[in-house]
Image (cartoon, grey):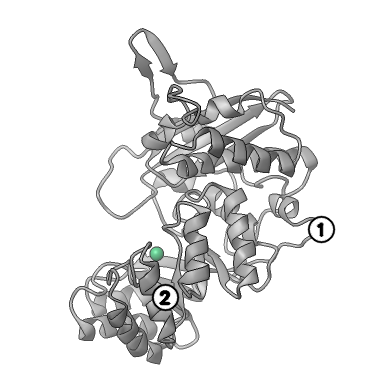
Amino acid sequence: MTIIAVDPFYLKMPQITDAADGTQDTLLVRVQTDEGITGWGECDASPLVSLSAYCCPMSHGNIINIRESLVGETLDSPNDVVRLHQKVLRNGLDIQQIHHAYSGADIALWDIVGQKLGEPIYRLLEPQSESHSKLPYASVLFGDTPEETYQIATRLCAQGYRAAKFGWGPMGKFGEENDVALVRAAREGMGEDAQIMIDAGVVWGDDYGTAYARAKQFAQFSPTWLEEPLAPDAIEAYMGLSKRNPPVPIAAGEGSGTYRMAEDLILHGGIQFVQIDVGRIGGITEAFRVRQLAEGHGVQYVNHTFKSHLSLAASLHVFASNESFNLLEYPAEGSDLSLRLTVERLKVGSDGKVALTGKPGLGVHVDTGAMSEYLVPVRIQLGDQVIFEPVEF
Ligand SMILES: [Mg+2]
């Protein structure tokens, strides 16, 4: 097959607020081939900054846009996807956000090869493997108070979630007593049998002494992990924390914009869970490399996903074939845009778990009717020369 078109699409809700909700807008990428097979992918990044990486005029040999690197290329096998990943990153060496931006195209290429070969993506990554369903955990913010957190937790419990992550909001901002009360409320609301995770939302920066003290206090509530107690790049602080042997496992990694950042956390940060966003790190190709590194170092791989079920499916293919990586961050809520974007949704089954659809490629398709309702046409013109304009889909 030959790649004949690479098109990014900017989608948004009518109103964008400053809430920490990454589903308010998105960048979808469609890749088309001369055999009529089309693939889709989604980026978790600033959509228009990323869009520019698909069309910016060449500055020199290290700033060549993604579209130019891909159109006309051969695409028949997983090896081609990996080869094109290397080519795009080499051609875009000096484009700062290239990994974020390329994530969508990389996912689309895997989708195409899977469709062509009649295989779901996880089986292209690991031939002959089986996919394993995962326990979804609902990801929510702490309430403003412990009481509010308790209400949220009881609601999630009533909805049937057997695992939930509480994060950000007041955590770390009003002293030790309030922090402990928040976690106690989460545990009491979810009940003794549920798994709870605590996301500190990078609140202690590089202060690993406080992070350690909180981990000790939270241990009585048996959280599965304490997530991002420190800044994403505070690797030495993570190292300091892990050397103290905290009684609660430490999770981090969603801020990894490159493989190298995740590698640093695994090799030098002493974390027990690595959380990778397939729409940020450079797509399935890079996320799978992190999974393999995690397997070699006794670290559990978990997805970070707060986008549509297109991203959720892409995230799950990366680690579906490893049975012991059993947790799935599950975007249960989100904007209408994110909820309506796909024809299929990865629903929670009667066993309380989430599985892939089993169809070739991603196994999830974009609902182009819904897409058209949120699409914002983008046109970029330099003088008289149009370098980007809306296309049909
Ligand atoms: Mg987080």
User: Foreground: 290 or 310?
Assistant: 290
Residue found at x 39% / y 24%: 378
Q: In this view of the protein, can residue 120 be seen by the observer?
A: yes
Q: Is residue 285 left or right of residue 232?
A: right
Vertical order, 235 against 115 (above or below): below
Furthest-left residue in this view: 174
Taking the image as four quarters, which one is ligand 1 found in?
A: bottom left
Tag 2: Cα neighbours inside 10 Å, few (<14), some, or many (≥20)?
some
Image quadrant holding the C terminus, namely: top right
Which quadrant of the view contains residue 342? top right
x, y percent for residue 355? 64, 61
What quarter of the picture does the N terminus occupy?
Answer: top right
Secondary structure of the residue carrying numbered label 1: loop
x%, y% of residue 243?
A: 43, 83
Q: Name the spot of residue 376 as percent of width and height, x first.
A: 38, 29
Q: Residue at x 67, y 39 (%)?
A: 83
Distance of label 1 from label 2 (alpha carbons): 38 Å
Residue 6 seen by the camera: no
Q: Amino acid at mark 2?
A: Met
- The disc labelled 1 sits on which kind of residue? Gln
Q: Is the residue marked by circle 1 packed among few (<14), some (14-19), or many (20+) residues within 10 Å?
A: few
Q: Which of the 4 image quarters holds residue 222? A: bottom left
| Res 128 label | 1
Comes first in the chain, label 1 or label 2:
1
Which mark identifies residue 239?
Answer: 2
